[in-house]
Amino acid sequence: MTEADPKRIHILLRELQNLIKNAQEQWGITLTGQGSINDKLKAFAPVANAVHPLGPVNIVGLSTEFSQKIALIRSTLSNFRNTTVHDISQLNLSIGSDSLLKRYQFALLEESNNLNTVSEVRENIKICKELALDICQNSQDTFKFVIQQTSIFCKQLGLKVWEVEQSHGSTLTLSISGSIIVMDIKFDETAHKIVQVTITYTHKPEDDDRIDNLLTLQLSNFRYFKLFKKNLQALATLDTLSKIYSANCFHCIRCISNDVKSIYEKEFSALAGDIQKILTDGHGIPLFHVERVGPSIAYWAPKFRIHETDWNNVKDIIAKGDSCESLGLFYQLWIMMEESRSRNTFLPIERNHYLIEENDDEYELLQSYDFMPQDLTFPLLPTPLKFLQQPKDDSQTSANIQFVLWLFPPVYVTDTVAKEIEDLAGFFGSRIMTDDPKSLSLEQLLISDIVPPAKMTRGSTMDVSWEKKFEDSPYTQIYTLDIKHTNAKKIERIPFIYPFQIFSFIEVCYGHMLLIRF
């Protein structure tokens, strides 16, 4: 949106409100009018640990978009003021002009009040619909709602949507298209069920049945509808960024997928197929289209989860190229892309991986690419690995895009570890925010599942205690923890530029999990 195409003030304010609201939802902030100030501060305590550059919200992008909308509002107000004053000065309103201006002012106030009322009613209707669907046992109503909401959500993402009726039977197709992807959702209107979701690509055939099966499963079960929307949003983001910039984001993700798979195969060969050891001593197990579209890496799991996993079955599933759902409960890094403030370079379409393989001609590559400054050492491999850093001629492959790792579940780390991650990601200058007075300590965060955060305050000098009753013992065990405030940050996303950085992040996160969990 530019100044040449200004929006009405109430629309700009609504967009600004939605921007803040979305950030609050990602941070987990819920604003209510009940409770004292101290109660609200305690409720916000865990949120304070997530408000930093590695938290769930892209603060750089948020601040940029916020500033842009504020500038547009100011520009629109300035134009309105100047134009109105100029127009009135040209009119002969010497008699009754005050009355006309007052009536105009009252009309604006009435319009504003009506818009606020309609907005509140719309929000209440939305909440009521969500509550009703949670307890709705009517599959027909739920099915209609899912189709309707999918169509609305796709339009909000900037995708084109149209419905196509088949020439036979009751099967309909909801077609959704972007600049690169086309999604066809086939559903049976009579049986009230999703038949198949299919993703195709316009630029190059790289269809993957695993993506189709994942989206079909998630859309068919209302419990997974939110996860389906997140995956749809991820695909739409890659499609939109590819349209705006010259880089093909789907190709960039495929390059990283190839590297992750290649390194896993090298460690698999070095350990004679010991997948468990790859998880505990290597650089994780690759997962493709398990819960989330695209590549993920399972990098850590608690001991009990490792012991109860059938590793032979996992090995067979990965060898077949199928989705390994049993690793879905492990700690994972999900690889995606997002818009960035600075321009970065990516591989051209003819190159499918950053990793330099044995059959690659390094001299030839050196003519076109910059290598990583130093070789990356992998403990399980006999020789270091080399990665391409960026093309030397970046005119066709540079864009305001960056890779991003999403951590599932989020990891709580000390300030020192957070700054180490920032340094590895290239965030020089200590961009980690200073400690918030409402934030919880690392010790408090580690027991947050046992002791509610609302009962803990920063800098508490009192011991926190809780009871635990074991089935094989008649006694109740009492645990206590002397609260000491070790500054902590909640890490949910790690922006980065070069794929080889992923494996350094894995080493840091894995080492931290060993420290705090064992």
Image (spheres, rainbow, N blue to C red):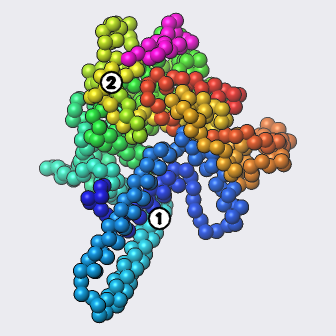
The image quadrant where one finds the C terminus is top right
In the rendered picture of this protein, how many numbered marks are placed on residues? 2
Residue drawn 52% across the image and 44% down it: 56
Q: Is residue 375 magenta?
A: yes
- Local secondary structure at mark 2: loop
Instruction: Decide: is 139 above or below 385.
Output: below
Q: Residue 244 appears in which quarter of the rendering?
A: top left
- How far across and how far down the image is residue 253, in percent? 37, 30
- How far across and how far down the image is residue 238, in percent? 34, 39
Mark 2 lies on residue: 347
The type of residue carrying mark 1 is Ile
Residue drawn 39% across the image and 62% down it: 73
- How far across and how far down the image is residue 220, in percent? 37, 47
> Which sits in the foreground, 184 or 425?
425
Q: Is residue 269 magenta?
A: no
The type of residue carrying mark 2 is Leu
- Local secondary structure at mark 1: helix
> Which sits in the foreground, 4 or 312?
4
Residue drawn 34% across the image and 85% down it: 101
Mark 1 lies on residue: 127
Q: Left of 384 or right of it: where is 355?
A: left
Q: Nearer the viewer, mark 2 or mark 1?
A: 2
Q: Main secondary structure of the magenta part?
A: loop
Q: Which residues are magenta?
A: 370-386
